[in-house]
Image (tube, rainbow, N blue to C red):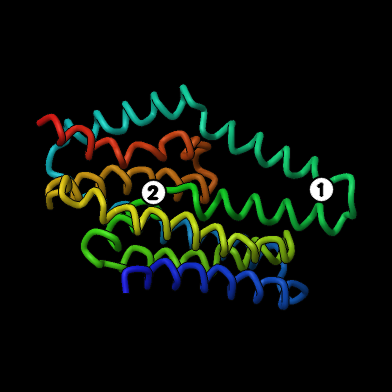
Amino acid sequence: MILSGVIANSVAVGLGSLFGVFFRNKFNKKVIDNVMNGMGLCVLYVGVSGSLAGKNILVTIGSIALGGVIGELIDIDERLRKFGFAMEDRFRSNTDKKESLAEGFLNSTMVICVGAMAIVGSLQSGLIGNHETLYAKAFIDLFVVLAMSATMGIGVFFSAFSILFYQGAITLFAGTISPFLSEVVIGEVTCVGSLVIIAIGLNILGITKIKAANLSLAPFIPIIIYLFI
């Protein structure tokens, strides 16, 4: 089924967040930090592995540069932050519980949705029926949201619906652009997306503070480039 990877990812996020809330009193900060560091390493592994799919370094460099410029001009990172602040302001006038729910939902959605694994994995599912990237992302997300929900509460659970709609839309849309995508283009998309994945891994480990959201359009640039080559 074309949405198998998306559904698996959504279910993993939902289960992971529920486990985190249920067992939150049994975790301490050291355990949570250790799990997050481990997941950061896994994200780096996925990124490095996928980055080898590219064959044209100029396309890779151009895509990262152009995607970064567009992302900065639009300032996707800042727009997402403003959206988060707006949602928090909306709930702040109500109960503290609702405020916590909004914070958990928004923060977890940014972590698990805004990234190249979501884009590349969904494209692979929609184009060639390969769900391996989304399955790997589901496994990683399960532990990431488990750690997040242990500190942020049940709001993290609702990010499972964000995954379902966001990645599902990309997966279904991929079929409409498949005539324009060759094996070479898919390889370049995977390569560029994987470099953004590496940035996310480095951020999770606390090594860098790269605005990965502002690079989230870069994986789509090879598609445009190869239309004119």
Please report the residue visible at 46 percent of the width from the left and 34 percent of the height from the top: 214
Quadrant housing the C terminus: top left
Q: Is residue 29 above or below residue 69?
A: below
Q: Is residue 114 left or right of residue 198?
A: right
Distance CA(mark 2)–CA(mark 1) = 30 Å
Which image quarter: residue 223? Answer: top left
Query: What residue did someone put label 1 on?
Result: 91
Q: Which mark is residue 54?
A: none
**Image-based side of 190 in relation to 19, left or right:** left
> Where the N terminus falls, by quadrant?
bottom left
Q: Secondary structure at mark 1?
A: helix
Residue shown at 24%/48% (left/top)? 177
Q: Badge 2 is on which residue?
A: 116
Q: Is residue 9 left or right of residue 153?
A: left
Local crowd size for mark 2, using a 10 Å CA cut-off: few (<14), some (14–19), many (≥20): many
Label 2 secondary element: helix
Residue 4 appears left or right of 31: left
Mark 1: which amino acid? Phe
Circles 2 and 1, Cβ within 8 Å, touching? The answer is no
Which of 77 and 144 lies nearest the eye of the viewer? 77
Q: Nearer the viewer, mark 2 or mark 1?
A: 1
Q: Indicate whether 69 appears above or below 11.
A: above
- Residue at the (31%, 68%) spot, across then down: 131
Mark 1 crowdedness (10 Å alpha carbons): few <14, some 14-19, many ≥20: some
